[in-house]
Image (spheres, rainbow, N blue to C red):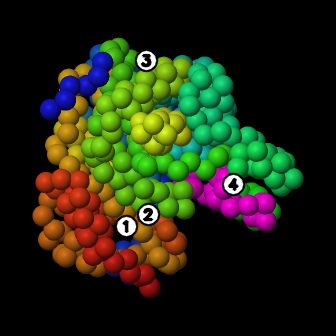
Amino acid sequence: MSQPNSSPSAASPAVLRARVRADSKETLRQDRPILTGAKCRPTAPMTPPFASLPRTLLLLGSGELGKEVAIAAQRLGCRVIAVDRYAGAPAMQVADACEVIAMTDAEALKAVVRRHQPDLVIPEIEALAVDALAELEAEGISVIPTARATAVTMNRDRIRDLAASELGLRTARFAYAGSAAELAAAAEPLGWPVVVKPVMSSSGKGQSVVQGPAGIAASWEAALAGARGAGARVIVEEFLNFELEITLLTVKQWKGPTLFCPPIGHIQERGDYQCSWQPAAVPDTALSAAQAMAVAVTDNLGGAGLFGVEFFLCRKADGGTEVVFSELSPRPHDTGLVTLMGQNLSEFELHLRAVLGLPIPAIHSLGPAASRVILASTSAPALQFEGLDEALAVPDTQVLLFGKPDARPHRRLGVALARGANEAEARQRADGAAAAVRVIAHP
């Protein structure tokens, strides 16, 4: 067992009507009132940490990670308002109220927050009108971890400049480009192959590995197609022959030391997480280096909450391990779904405790654990799942189906979680359970 290291207007209630499919027939979801004004809470927002609960939390983004945050919040008696760009998103299915808006529309985002006057605004996705968050924060609304942290981490250039230039952290060698010609000129000094990514994207969209000059034009077009927003700028990086990619879940508290979860190993394909395991085997010196980097960057970003800090572990010529900072998310991390099986407190419980100012006496492993995603292979307007009986027959295994209303190729629809006597057994069980689940298009 390891110890952690050291007054709103009285508006009439709005109603969200979300159409969902059930039993192969399209039915109208029961009306769910939106809480507004005094019905949401009797007083103006307070600043965390809080002396009492419950509190009202507004989630900006309502996917599978937001759903687990909502569940963890409700277990503490809190009220949850789930906001996303489409109806029936996973967190909306368990929230007290929900809203559908264009998440990058600054006026719509400000309007929904001002209407509900939550105690905390908790961004759960990257595609947000971040300038609106800064304006709301200036009005006294608490944004988790901070509006600046959300803005810095949604753009690869801003977080990379912070890490490499301002904080002096070891990163992959990189350059920026605003055209295919600039990309070709920037890539050459880095050596082939190189990795090209839009400065604004998520879930690996627009990323590619370029083996040589002949691939530059296609890589540039792929980056533009996968970019979020109208910007035409990419980051090009040296290709690292890393031995392991890890996520270090870092818990920053309002008061008290920064804490760390046992490191999580993971594998990505198409720039998106496929499987993870915890605890990952990381040398003590490398883990200490990663923790020091995580503290440096999260202290700079400020606020409180759980951060997913990603690193590459590379073998040095002398046989040692070099730790290279990769990326950071100021929120629960998809690779951290494994903590639902692997820790005494999941990443979602830790996030809530941190932002509410509740104590975290200890974080410790429950033994080797692993996760494997369940993906869609084709597009479908509605879904069914088969093979759950086989999947759940695997010992010490759970399957989470996220409740997403439709499918597209490679969309993450669920995850299998497992524990085992060792890492290999845990990963084998998670892989087997995920493979047993079949996604069926529902007519």
- Read off the magenta span: 192-216
Q: Using the image, determine if residue 148 lies above or below residue 73.
A: above
* Residue displayed at 73% across by 61% down: 212
Do we see residue 126 in this rendering?
A: yes
State the mark number for residue 374. Answer: 1
Residue at image mark 3:
47
Q: Amino acid at mark 2?
A: Arg
Q: Position of residue 358 (x, y in %)?
A: 27, 23
Q: Position of residue 225 (x, y in %)?
A: 72, 61
Foreground tag (1 vs 4): 4
Asked if the magenta segment contains residue 266, the reply would be no
Residue 220 vertical placement versus 291 (above, below): below
- Residue that badge 2 annotates: 412
Q: Which labelled disc corresponds to residue 221?
A: none
User: Spatial distance from mark 1 to mark 3, Cα to Cα?
Assistant: 39 Å
Disc 4 designates what residue? 192
Task: Name the secondary structure under disc 3.
Answer: loop
Q: Position of residue 395 (x, y in %)?
A: 12, 64
Question: Disc 1 or 3, which lies upstream in sequence?
Answer: 3
Which of marks 3 and 2 precedes in the sequence? 3
Q: Secondary structure at mark 1?
A: strand
Q: Marks 2 and 3, how far apart in space?
A: 35 Å
Q: Are marks 2 and 1 in contact (CB under 8 Å)?
A: yes
Q: Quick one: 244 or 23, which is closer to the camera?
A: 244
Does residue 120 show up? no
Amino acid carrying label 1: it is Ile
Q: Residues within 10 Å of mark 3 (few under 14, many from 20)?
A: few
Q: Is residue 215 magenta?
A: yes
Residue found 50% across the figure and 61% down from its top: 269
* Residue 191 as seen in the image, left or right of residue 97: right
